[in-house]
Amino acid sequence: MASSFDHVSAISLFVEDLQAAKDFYSSVFRVPVVFEDATSVALSLENLIVNLLQTDSANELVEPLAVGSRESGPRFQLSIWVPDVDAVCVELQRRGVNLLTGPRDRPWGMRTASFVDPAGHSWEIGQSTTGG
């Protein structure tokens, strides 16, 4: 059986404060916890697991490199496409999320907004403005 690399099954986000991260994702995304132990919490988004892993436990996954700190700034961005960015922004703000940018139209045919979780991971919500 050949391996397929055409999808992402899980993303692990390294966090300093596991409880704050769990509270954020539970409140903002309203998704179920599918696994939890002393150092991690896994939440299920449609077709994707987001694993929140305490930074101290993440070191063994990236050795000999070190886990970057929140103060280093975002190193990647996770994006979710939605039908109405403006409506989602209103709902995110109602849930206590502070938007970093947007919503605003981008020259590449998207309307986007962004925010970060308590550990500094950048999230973008976007909608096509070209109808595609």
Image (cartoon, helix red, strand yellow):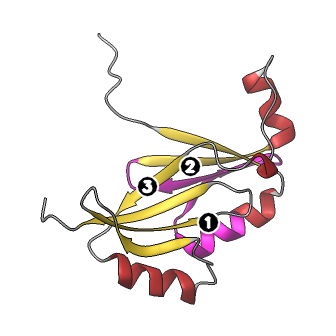
SS class, disc 1: helix
**Above/below status of 92 relative to 32:** below
Mark closest to the chain's N terminus, 2 or 1: 1
Do callouts 2 and 1 mark residues in contact (Cβ within 8 Å)?
Answer: yes
For label 1, the crowd category at 10 Å Cα-Cα, with few meaning under 14, some 14 to 19 and many 20 or more, is: some
Gap between marks 2 and 1 measured at Cα:
9 Å
Q: Which residue is mark 1?
A: 25
Q: Residue at x 44, y 47 (%)?
A: 48
Using residue 111 as the reference point, say whether residue 65 is left or right of it.
right
- Find out whether residue 46 is within the magenta segment: yes
- Find out whether residue 106 is within the magenta segment: no
Gap between marks 3 and 2 measured at Cα:
13 Å
**Above/below status of 15 relative to 21:** above
Using residue 120 as the reference point, say whether residue 38 is left or right of it.
right
Q: Residue at x 53, y 59 (%)?
A: 123
Do callouts 3 and 1 mark residues in contact (Cβ within 8 Å)?
Answer: no
Q: Magenta residues, as a range?
A: 22-47
- For badge 3, the amino acid type reads Ser
Using residue 2 as the reference point, say whether residue 52 is left or right of it.
right
Q: Please provide percent x and percent y for residue 130.
A: 15, 64
Q: Residue at x 27, y 55 (%)?
A: 108
Mark closest to the chain's N terminus, 3 or 2: 2
- For badge 1, the amino acid type reads Tyr
Q: Which residue is mark 2?
A: 50
Gap between marks 3 and 1 measured at Cα:
15 Å
Q: Give the number of the mark in front: 3 or 2.
A: 3
Using residue 116 as the reference point, say whether residue 130 is left or right of it.
left
Q: Which residue is mark 3?
A: 79
Specify whether residue 102 is in view. Answer: yes
Q: Please provide percent x and percent y for residue 128.
A: 23, 64
